[in-house]
């Protein structure tokens, strides 16, 4: 977290520093340097260390801001968790996540850097992965109790599969191939068809 001195700054100056950091991280990911950030923010280099413990501290804070903004996109869907079939919730949340990425192109670029080999030096993606898989497993168990999913399905295994494949679809189609939301959802629906209906004729 930033030091208290950062939060004591005028709002305009805080935003200038954050905007400069987002630009730097969107361009270079975790390899962004302090020099480019302070130059864009128009602050002395020494001031940076009065506000943050280092580049890792600032990067973590930016990721927290991104998560907070994404939750705002998902806030109305969170009320549906456990109330609608998991697959329906999953697809709605996935689509909303794509809309978020489209509306915030710089955040999308930061995500692309994180997803590149060696780009996630803080273990952020792994932490999010474990949290997501656990949430999916919980929701899958609820659907098993309702008779919407077979009782013998391994909820954690299915959660891992859905999280892993959907993440790969998003990374491949969004970051590398720059596909539209509709094209990415079409790929996801093809995957869902296999999951729900199987591969037997």
Image (cartoon, helix red, strand yellow):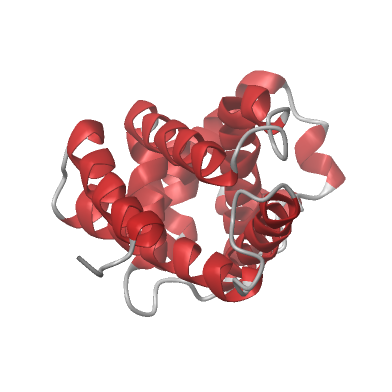
**Residue 112 seen anywhere in this rendered image of the structure:** no
Task: Return the x and y of residue 2 as percentages of the image width and height.
Answer: 75, 49
Give left or right: position of 11 versus 122.
Answer: right
Q: Is residue 73 placed above or below 149 in the rendered structure?
A: above
Task: Return the x and y of residue 117 as percentages of the image width and height.
Answer: 33, 78
Q: Residue at x 46, y 31 (%)?
A: 96
Task: Return the x and y of residue 187 as percentages of the image width and height.
Answer: 22, 49
Q: Residue furthest bottom?
A: 118
Q: Is residue 65 placed above or below 195 in the rendered structure?
A: above
Give left or right: position of 188 versus 135.
Answer: left
Q: Residue at x 68, y 57 (%)?
A: 144
Q: Residue at x 30, y 52 (%)?
A: 193
Give left or right: position of 157 versus 199.
Answer: right
- Location of the C terminus (image quadrant): bottom left
Task: Give the camera-side residue of 175 and 190.
Answer: 190
Number of marks drawn: 0
Task: Give the camera-side residue of 114 and 94.
Answer: 94
**Residue 173 seen anywhere in this rendered image of the structure:** yes
Give left or right: position of 174 versus 130.
Answer: left
Task: Give the camera-side residue of 43 and 160.
Answer: 160
The quarter of the picture where residue 4 lies is top right
Q: Residue at x 21, y 52 (%)?
A: 173
Task: Return the x and y of residue 52 as percentages of the image width and height.
Answer: 70, 55
């Amino acid at each position: 977290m930033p030091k208290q001195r950062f939060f004591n700054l005028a709002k305009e100056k805080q935003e200038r520093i954050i905007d400069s950091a987002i630009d730097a991280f969107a361009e270079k990911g975790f390899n962004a340097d302090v020099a480019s950030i302070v130059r864009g923010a128009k602050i002395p280099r020494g001031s940076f260390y009065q506000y943050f413990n280092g580049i890792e501290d600032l990067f973590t804070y930016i990721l927290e801001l991104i998560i907070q903004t994404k939750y705002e996109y998902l806030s109305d869907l969170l009320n549906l968790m456990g109330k609608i079939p998991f697959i329906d919730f999953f697809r709605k949340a996935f689509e909303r996540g794509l809309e978020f990425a489209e509306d915030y192109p710089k955040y999308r670029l930061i995500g692309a850097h994180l997803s590149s080999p060696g780009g996630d030096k803080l273990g952020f993606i792994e932490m999010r992965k474990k949290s997501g898989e656990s949430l999916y497993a919980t929701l899958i168990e609820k659907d098993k109790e309702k008779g919407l999913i077979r009782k013998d399905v391994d909820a954690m295994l299915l959660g891992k599969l859905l999280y892993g494949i959907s993440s790969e679809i998003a990374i491949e189609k969004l970051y590398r191939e720059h596909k539209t939301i509709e094209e990415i959802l079409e790929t996801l629906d093809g995957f869902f068809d296999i999951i729900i209906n199987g591969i037997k004729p």
